[in-house]
Amino acid sequence: MSNMAPHGFKQDMPPPGGYAAIRFQRNLPTRGFSGVVVFGTVLTVCGLGFYRLGQGNNEKRELKREVAWSRIHLVPLLLAERDRDEYRRSEAALAREKEIMKDVHGWEAGKSVYSTKRYTPSNVVVL
């Protein structure tokens, strides 16, 4: 014990100039975009989506209008085609009736079976 201090201990002292400062602050990196950027992006995407939705609705409305007008313009053609088909079928039915009933005395082919002078279209469609 001869090389010890007179009191028996050696005190540990700080280095000359002191210790370095202790970093106690949280140093977290930024994670992603700021709230303003995210909110602006969401608003932009929603705005563009609603714009495209409106454009699609206008396009659908215009297509519906086009279909309606094409049907309106086709109605006379379809009615004329139906009238021609009905006339052709009635002439064929009259010819068949004349052929079938040619031997029956007093039979008038094509005479209406109704007791009226008004036109009554046939209700039975033969396909």
Image: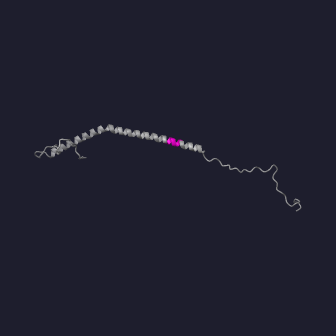
Residue at 58% across, 43% down:
37
Q: Is residue 47 magenta?
A: yes
Q: Please, is residue 62 above or below residue 4 in the view? A: above
Viewed as shown, does residue 25 lie left or right of 53? right
Residue in the foreground of this view, choosing between 13 and 84: 13
Q: Is residue 81 magenta?
A: no
Viewport quadrant of the N terminus: bottom right
Residue at 49% across, 42% down:
50
The x, y position of residue 126, in whole percent, is 24, 47
Q: What color scheme is it?
A: one colour
Residue at 43% across, 39% down:
58
Residue in the foreground of this view, choosing between 124 and 113: 113
Viewed as shown, does residue 127 lie left or right of 59? left
Residue positioned most to the left: 105
The x, y position of residue 114, in whole percent, is 17, 45
The x, y position of residue 47, in whole percent, is 51, 41
Residue positioned most to the bottom: 1
Name the chief secondary structure element in magenta: helix
Say how many tags the image has. 0
The x, y position of residue 34, in whole percent, is 60, 45
Viewed as shown, does residue 60 lie left or right of 32? left
Q: Quadrant of residue 118?
A: top left
Q: Quadrant of residue 41?
A: top right
First to last magenta residue range: 44-49
